[in-house]
Amino acid sequence: MKKILTATVSRVWSGVAQKPASRVLVASCNFSKDATFEIKKCDLYRLEEGPPDTTVLTREDGLKYYRMMQTIRRMELKADQLYKQKFIRGFCHLCDGQEACCVGLEAGINPTDHVITSYRAHGLCYTRGLSVRSILAELTGRKGGCANGKGGSMHMYAKNFYGGNGIVGAQGPLGAGVALACKYKGKNEVCLTLYGDGAANQGQIAEAYNMAALWKLPCVFICENNLYGMGTSAERAAASTDYYKRGNFIPGLRVDGMDVLCVREATRFAADYCRSEKGPIVMELLTYRYHGHSMSDPGVSYRTRQEIQNVRSKSDPIMLLKNRMVDSKLATIEEFKEIDVEVRKEIDDAVHFATTDPEPALEELGHHIYCDNPPFEVRGTSQWIKFKSLP
Amino acid sequence: MAAVSGLMRRPLEQVSGLLRRRFHRTAPAALQVTVRDAINQGMDEELERDEKVFLLGEEVAQYDGAYKVSRGLWKKYGDKRIIDTPISEMGFAGIAVGAAMAGLRPICEFMTFNFSMQAIDQVINSAAKTYYMSGGLQPVPIVFRGPNGASAGVAAQHSQCFAAWYGHCPGLKVVSPWNSEDAKGLIKSAIRDNNPVVVLENELMYGVPFELPSEAQSKDFLIPIGKAKIERQGTHITVVAHSRPVGHCLEAATVLSKEGIECEVINMRTIRPMDIETIEASVMKTNHLVTVEGGWPQFGVGAEVCARIMEGPAFNFLDA
């Protein structure tokens, strides 16, 4: 009731203020610079203290997180559409529902820190700095894609972002390796190594835990637990679904992955832990994906539509942030609507590019096989067909 | 002996000059170096040259290496650069690849390449394919090294040759040294190369001494990856091999020479990218070809050499 009242009042106010000057006046009267929110306490394992249970959100940050999450949401939904229109082929794993994870993680670290994740990577590609254009064009396999159209959905790279990895769990040791490089270089950087609830059962994750703990690598192991590994629920795949405890000798925390502020504080806490040379830490983000495992999975054979609808209406990360901000007068509904319009335009622009940009030329099939190598010839489908390979 | 009689014959004024010349002649001694020491020297020089280079693997540090190839390196460079790992091939190979992606230059040792099968996903999918899949954005400058192929009576699980397995994959470079010069030059080139390189050594060759020519004693001695070497010139038949069998071929060539058959023995040195031009030129000269290898014949290195000879200009010169 209070929410509806506040919304109505703000709508009336902005309706009244016609001239720009008075709108500015209304804006400065009506909006706070920041607000303090209570966030859910994290479950702790082998830790005396955890992240704080309140946090300050500035108006600027809040609008930024909203914009980013909305962009990711719209981008993923567009990718769904493009896939059904057959502009995107191959694999396409969407992360709508999990936006708070990507945006919250990025908010908790520095651009000089490092991130590596699995194939459900589009959201992190965006938060790590790739434009929507370059991501969508990569999905549609065009020259303008971030990997020149040669990687696709699962192999997108950016500065301090190591993909996008197709093999489940392989990114575990890779991330520990990046963390080793961080420690070796001594610049106080950390590596966030993400994997899912399904990948948590990979042996190589346990190997990575062991070596990271042994050598005190600044690696934050993050299990994005969206409750299902493809079509198998977590309870059917894991003898222990307390993924934050699976590091055994490594401390862990379980975080509400649908609340961007919770994720931000937990990430800050975890990164600080690693930066103080205490070794690795495990973070479990409890989250949910609205889509199926990939575009070939409707996502309703192993879970009910009711469950999906429930999460959407009660815990949608974008809705949670918006409501919080409106309720504490950090922003109005109209502002969010404006952001939505801008985001839509950005996505439409990107879609136009992604569907009209040419595909890489066949002559370039052999490029990028070796790095820093003199050009050589690659045998094609027969001994008379040769491709030139440039590094 | 010749120098001494020369000294007796020459006038006294020239003695000091001759003495100086004698010292100069004996200074770059024909240095006998085992393959093990050659690899050790190569790694030592590269570790010294570039501080991004480091070595990790089982028993490489405090044990001095399972086959003592990394002897002395831990004492010299310490825990940061020479890292003992637990028995977790998939884990530490992945860690090495991740470190390479983040800008370091790791040397990942497999105790034998048989154990690399546990980590082969990291070698192929994470290391070899990444530069291509990223559209040229993410290089992986890593070296995977270790003994490959048969040893002395270690049974099937410990005797596999992986030349054909790794040679199959684009994005990887695969080298297979035979003697000390090969070993030193190729390990140094591999470490300096910005691509993932698999160095297939041979355990039985580790203890074999070879003469290391003076240029190979330089700290910048490199053998280019992708170039084969003609170890012995011949006219009647081309014999192509890599790793330890090169030695067998040279011995066979000596035996055949007594029967009037002159073998041209080619040491491949690199499996991928293969130097087929050298082999073609030789076959076009001798008209006969035999491939010799330690791996299984089906789908092997020899099969690939034969397929390429068939597809190329040398086919028309081939009698057998």
Image (cartoon, rainbow, N blue to C red):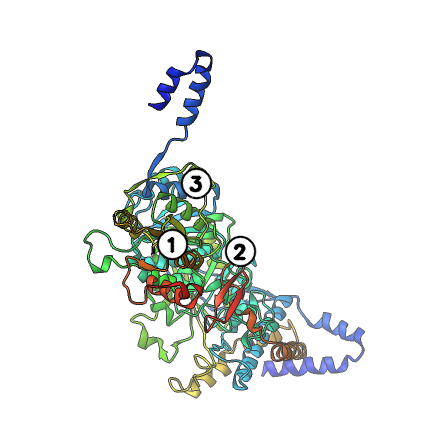
Q: Is residue A26 left or right of residue A40?
A: right
Say what amino acid the circle numbered 1 marks: Met
In this view, A360 is above or below A77? above
The outermost residue toward the front is: B260
As drawn, the label of residue B45 is 3
How packed mark 2 is, by other alpha carbons closer than 10 Å (few <14, some 14-19, many 20 or more), is: some
How packed mark 3 is, by other alpha carbons closer than 10 Å (few <14, some 14-19, many 20 or more), is: some
Determine which quarter of the picture holds residue A323: bottom right
| Subunit bearing disc 3 | B
**Residue denoted by label 2:** A372
**Res A276 visible:** no
Say what amino acid the circle numbered 2 marks: Asp
Depth check, mark 1 against mark 3: the one in front is: 1
Q: What SS does tag 3 mark?
A: helix
Depth check, mark 1 against mark 2: the one in front is: 1
Say what amino acid the circle numbered 3 marks: Glu
**Point 44% across, 81% down: residue:** A292
Cα distance, mark 1 to mark 2?
Answer: 23 Å
In this view, A171 is above or below A26? above
**Point 41% across, 31% down: residue:** B28
Ranked by sequence position, the earlier of labels 1 and 3 is: 3
**Res B255 visible:** yes
Depth check, mark 2 against mark 3: the one in front is: 2
**B241 or B36: which is nearer to us?**
B241
Determine which quarter of the picture holds residue A159: bottom right
| Subunit bearing disc 2 | A
Cα distance, mark 2 to mark 3?
Answer: 22 Å
